[in-house]
């Protein structure tokens, strides 16, 4: 017998060797019909995988993100099967699930594929899906796996297998198709009722531009045709709300190839919008005890070496700027926090003066590949509503909760009411990518979880999503179209105070390390404004709009009075205009 623990805490005993499907069937037939994927002891497994040990079992349905991931990954296998059927001799690489659907990267060789081929591919995928082929995962030796793909002359799969350990390699079979795969599939193809291929694009093998350029085929699938129709309607609405389109129509921002890719130019109306958002947050921050600071746009390379940013991101950042001085190098500022650490270090602090709260709308620069740039959401220069709090350990809990209150105030003021909190912690297995000691990470993670619980937030824990220097609390906001965005983040950091040798004098006249809190309710102004535009379809809250009141004179004799009213409104900081065009009142009102 094995003991199985379920998410609700219940523990039940079952015969050894039962599958998740069989266990679900013992609970209810309805549950068994709805589960499409499972997790056992933190590892994704098939619903047909036998369980021989005690452990934690979670069932996933289409309503769960994990269920959708299995559904879409399985559909990627189906796509690959059809592509091999239609285009002889192609070489498959990888086909993962993504946030909305899936893709498969393919080397088409002498063949070419375009959107005109989508319909026949979709039709064939559904034909095969209706045959209800089971997805079967099987172990295979490294030699057998290499022989299989060498025979097919697929150097991509061969390269992947060469980096895997013997005994940990699995193939997935369905119908007459076999693919290298780690697992995570739905029971059979029959669950796939609707498929839509979305686009094709170029993608370098392993994201390295020195490698072969492949064709990436994007798609999405659903268990009901109705859901696909609703999704496509949502995409049409999203096109109407696209911040790039509305930003141009509302004359908020523009881009110029001469200025450079990913560097937005803010037009007068956009600059006014930014200024209002900044003023709004500065006012709230002042009430909360923050002090405004300003740091330069560049910093000595040594600054970012001390912070760890250069070691972590140096190769993918803008390259160092050399000066006439021998060996002197500067970097475009990738982060504000090292600058704020040096500001804190400019004097000796007493415990009586803490917490110290520095806030800055600081512009930072990070190199993004040209293919990753997207309007205001992915840019190379952006302004963060950055703040850093230096406090004692005793003050940490209260300060963290106060920052949560500030973030919620910002969301409420701008109409973002549907959100969840995500506690982002270290990867349990791969700790090498983080800096700092285990003890400092444990303390930081504990502080975030405790404060989040005390505020009564609905939260989930995601491992591997922490910043390299500390855990964080991310706010996942749903917009008017139901899309989820990460907006606002709060981080606890024991590491940078150590790296910069920050201290304060405690009541016993001894030097102590402060704890550092990083926070940015907007995240970046560019990305926040992009999301705000699409959330509101450009119809901003009244306090943010460029023009709050339009005065319409009925006739020529009312113009002077309109000007007086305009002056009165402007004197009371109400943004207004007079529409004195030589048009009818009806036309002026449109």
Image (cartoon, rainbow, N blue to C red):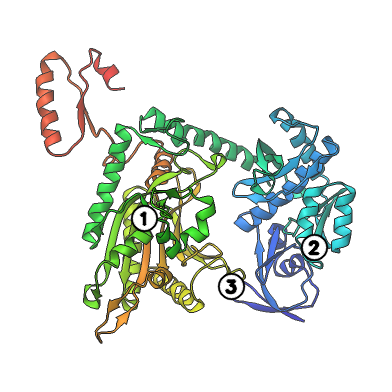
Q: Secondary structure at mark 2?
A: loop
Whole-percent x, y for residue 15 in the image: 79, 78
Q: Is residue 401 above or below residue 114?
A: below
Q: Which residue is located at x 72 percent, y 41 percent?
A: 212
Q: Residue 350 has which mark?
A: none
Which quadrant of the structure image shows residue 224?
top right
Observer-side mark, 2 or 1, equals 2
Crowding around mark 3 (Cα neighbors within 10 Å: few <14, some 14 to 19, many 20+) is: few
Q: Earlier in the sequence, mark 2 or mark 1?
A: 2
Q: Residue 8 has which mark?
A: 3
Quadrant that contains the C terminus: top left
Q: Residue 169 has which mark?
A: 2
Q: Is residue 281 above or below residue 573?
A: below
Whole-percent x, y for residue 580 in the image: 20, 18
Crowding around mark 2 (Cα neighbors within 10 Å: few <14, some 14 to 19, many 20+) is: some
Crowding around mark 1 (Cα neighbors within 10 Å: few <14, some 14 to 19, many 20+) is: many
Observer-side mark, 3 or 1, equals 1
| Residue tagged 1 | 521
Counting labels gives 3
């Amino acid at each position: 017998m094995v003991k199985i623990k379920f998410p609700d805490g219940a523990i039940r005993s079952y015969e050894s060797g039962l599958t998740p499907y069989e266990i679900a069937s013992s609970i209810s037939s309805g549950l068994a019909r709805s589960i499409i994927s499972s997790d056992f002891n933190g590892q994704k497994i098939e619903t047909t995988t036998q369980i021989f040990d005690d452990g934690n079992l979670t069932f996933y349905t289409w309503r769960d993100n994990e269920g959708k991931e299995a559904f879409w990954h399985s559909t990627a296998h189906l796509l690959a099967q059809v592509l091999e059927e239609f285009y002889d001799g192609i070489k498959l690489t990888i086909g993962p699930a993504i946030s909305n659907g899936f893709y498969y990267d393919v080397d088409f060789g002498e063949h070419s594929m375009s959107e005109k081929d989508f319909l026949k591919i979709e039709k064939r995928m559904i034909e095969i899906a209706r045959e209800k082929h089971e997805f079967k995962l099987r172990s295979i030796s490294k030699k057998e796996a290499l022989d299989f793909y060498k025979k097919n002359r697929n150097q991509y799969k061969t390269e992947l297998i060469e980096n895997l350990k013997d005994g940990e390699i699995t193939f997935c079979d369905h119908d007459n198709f076999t693919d290298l795969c780690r697992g995570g599939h739905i029971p059979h193809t029959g669950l796939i009722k609707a498929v839509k291929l979305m686009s094709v694009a170029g993608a370098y093998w392993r994201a390295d531009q020195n490698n072969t350029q492949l064709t990436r085929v994007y798609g999405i699938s659903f268990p009901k045709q109705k859901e696909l129709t609703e999704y496509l309607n949502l995409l049409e609405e999203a096109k109407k709300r696209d911040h790039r389109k509305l930003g141009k129509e509302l004359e908020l921002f523009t881009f110029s190839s001469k200025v450079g890719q990913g560097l937005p130019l803010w037009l007068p109306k956009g600059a006014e919008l930014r200024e209002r958002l900044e003023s709004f947050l500065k006012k709230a921050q002042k009430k909360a005890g923050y002090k405004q600071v300003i740091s330069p746009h560049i910093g000595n390379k040594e600054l970012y070496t001390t912070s760890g940013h250069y070691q972590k991101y140096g190769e993918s950042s803008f390259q160092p700027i050399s000066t006439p001085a021998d060996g002197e190098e500067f970097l475009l500022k990738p982060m504000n926090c090292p600058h704020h650490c040096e500001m804190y270090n400019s004097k000796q602090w007493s415990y009586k003066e803490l917490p110290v709260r520095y806030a800055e709308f600081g512009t930072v620069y990070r190199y993004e590949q040209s293919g990753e740039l997207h309007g205001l959401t992915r840019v190379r220069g952006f302004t963060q509503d950055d703040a850093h709090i230096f406090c004692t350990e005793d003050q940490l809990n209260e300060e963290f909760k106060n920052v949560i209150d500030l973030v919620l105030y910002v969301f409420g003021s701008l109409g973002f009411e549907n959100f969840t909190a995500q506690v982002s912690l270290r990867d349990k297995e791969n700790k090498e990518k983080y800096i700092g000691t285990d003890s400092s990470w444990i303390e930081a993670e504990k502080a975030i979880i405790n404060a989040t619980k005390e505020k009564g937030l609905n939260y989930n824990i995601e491992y591997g999503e922490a910043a390299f220097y500390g855990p964080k609390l991310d706010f996942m906001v749903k917009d008017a179209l139901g899309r989820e965005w990460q907006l606002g983040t709060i981080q606890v950091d024991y590491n940078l105070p150590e790296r910069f040798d920050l201290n304060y004098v405690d009541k016993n006249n001894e030097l102590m390390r402060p704890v550092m809190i990083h926070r940015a309710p907007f995240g970046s102004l560019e990305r926040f404004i992009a999301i705000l535009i699409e959330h509101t379809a450009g119809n901003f809250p009244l306090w943010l709009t460029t023009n709050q009141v339009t005065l319409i004179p009925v006739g020529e004799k009312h113009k002077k009075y309109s000007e007086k009213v305009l002056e009165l409104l402007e004197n009371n900081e109400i943004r207004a205009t007079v529409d004195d065009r030589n048009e009818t009142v009806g036309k002026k009102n449109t």
